[in-house]
Amino acid sequence: MSLACSACSYLNADHARFCAGCGARLGQAGAERDPLFGQLVHDRYRIVRVIGEGGMGRVYYAEQQMGTAKRPVAIKVLRGGPQDAVAVQRFTRECELVVQLTHPSTIRFYDFGKLPDGRLYIAMEYVEGRSLAGAIDQGPLPVATVERLLGQIGGALIEAHRRGIVHRDLKPDNILLAQNPDEGEFAKVLDFGIAKQDDGQGSGAEITSEGLIVGTPAYMSPEQLAAKPLDERSDVYALALIVFEMLTGKRPFVAKTPLEWATAHMTLPVPSFDDYPSTRLLPESKRAAILHALEKEPTRRTRSVRVFLEEFLGAQRLSGLAIAPSSDREPAPTGDAPTLAATPSAQRPSKASREEAPSLPTRRTPIVVLGAVIALAIGAGLAFAFRDRLGLVAGDSGETSSPQDAGPPPSDAGTDAPTRTASWLRIMSGSDRTAEVASALGPPDGQCATISPGGKVLLELAPGSRIHTDGTEAADLSVVVDAGSAPYRVDVLRERGEERTQIGADVMGSVEIDVDQFERTEFRYVRVKNPNRQGTVCLDAVAVVATQ
């Protein structure tokens, strides 16, 4: 049976939600043709079809023409009419926050801007897959699968927390399971759009309007529900809820209203693992790790995602994961000061985020809670007002700094600022799917090695030399490509034939990468690969970057 579109009479599949002929919502009286359908956004992205619609806006599948190839792109157009200058500034700063994230398990942004009608849009990585929520709906996941996904999700969060960014809306619907031919399903964390950044000194910049508590009640920490300052321990709580749900197939608490959810999170004990058939044989160490991370008082809770992973996976298993190095600093609660750091665009690593798996409707409706908790005692009332999810906005403008900044000099170091020097890699080998490999030697000069689909190049600084990272958050590696290059992948290796460490997936444009965050303190080779089926990567130069 076919569904006829009331706007254009196109016959659609009976399960379709949006018309394939004009983008109108099906089954809705008076639905009109989507004005963006078939249009070219920002002279780059051709809108092909509607993927889905949520509280924040509509998501489209689009294609970007790159030479003779077409790259699939997800375009999110935010709700609302023309935006004022302050809203646009907030939106821009939110996007600048997200593109700082480079972990392979974080969805990347490609572009963002404003449409002619004033609406804001984001162009981001399009990934085929299902949501973690959809996987859980089919039943408990095997412990081995939970461990693998936890390592990937945790790696993305550790990088964000290391940059002072708290997610605040972590939930199964915001985790996409993408198909990876080598590893099976691979977790991608979405929707850092309501995140909050802390500068490490107790101040932070909201990415939502002042006075709002943002999140999904089923996964909000007690302190988040109480409108208290948040730090990474709030994400730890949400992550532990997700792990519990992956293992049991059920949430630890059951509620229907925000008041019931708040009461549960603040007062009810976590159910026994013996109540669920799938976790009756769960090792005591894993049970203890989850319970520690679900402590209601933040000061008693697991202090970081890294520690949670250590307790749940074990230190030996954790050492094999591509995650950021540990930090001994105590979590600093984010306040209200506007301290969001904007990365200069020329040095900005690209990484994306989006609200939901574009191919699936969400089962848990995100909300924005207006106001704060009126009383926290058992049985006391909590006052909430609701509306749809807000668009992406940020706090007031503040001073900006680059994540490569080395910070203030030590007291005995004088006032000279640290300098950044680049040593350009020179020794290279290329696969049979590369051309002009010698053009990528030395500093950037506009001459490029051409890497065809499936091709790769291997570089080193000098024969037998080892490259040591600096142990800081500053970038260790710089990759320079031609502006029209297709997405590429970057790996580092200690020796030929050794298992590689991926430090950049689907990278677009020239980037600087902090290799330390992937537990690599030493490497010899850098490999740049074109994993695409179409399109070429034009590699100009690769450098080791050092602070002196």
Image: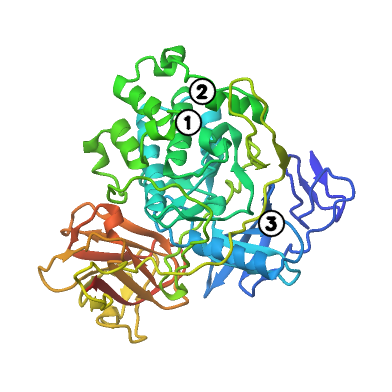
- What's the colour scheme? rainbow
- 51 sits to left or right of 459: right
Q: Quadrant of residue 387?
A: top right
Decide which of tag 2 and tag 3 comes sooner along the chain. Answer: 3
- Side of 84 where 174 appears, left or right: left
Residue 394: image tag:
none
233 or 148: nearer the viewer = 233
Between disc 3 and disc 1, whose residue precedes?
Answer: 3
Residue named by callout 3: 49
Q: Name the residue tied to disc 2.
A: 252
Q: In this rendered view, identify the residue nearer to me: 491 or 344.
A: 344
Q: CA distance from mark 3 to mark 1?
A: 35 Å
Position above or below: 453 against 76: below
- Specify whether 428 is left or right of 89: left
Please give the label number shown on residue 241: 1
**What is the x, y in percent for residue 434?**
32, 73
Q: What amino acid does circle 3 point to?
A: Arg
Say left or right for 64 vs 548: right
Question: Which quadrant does the C terminus fall into?
Answer: bottom left
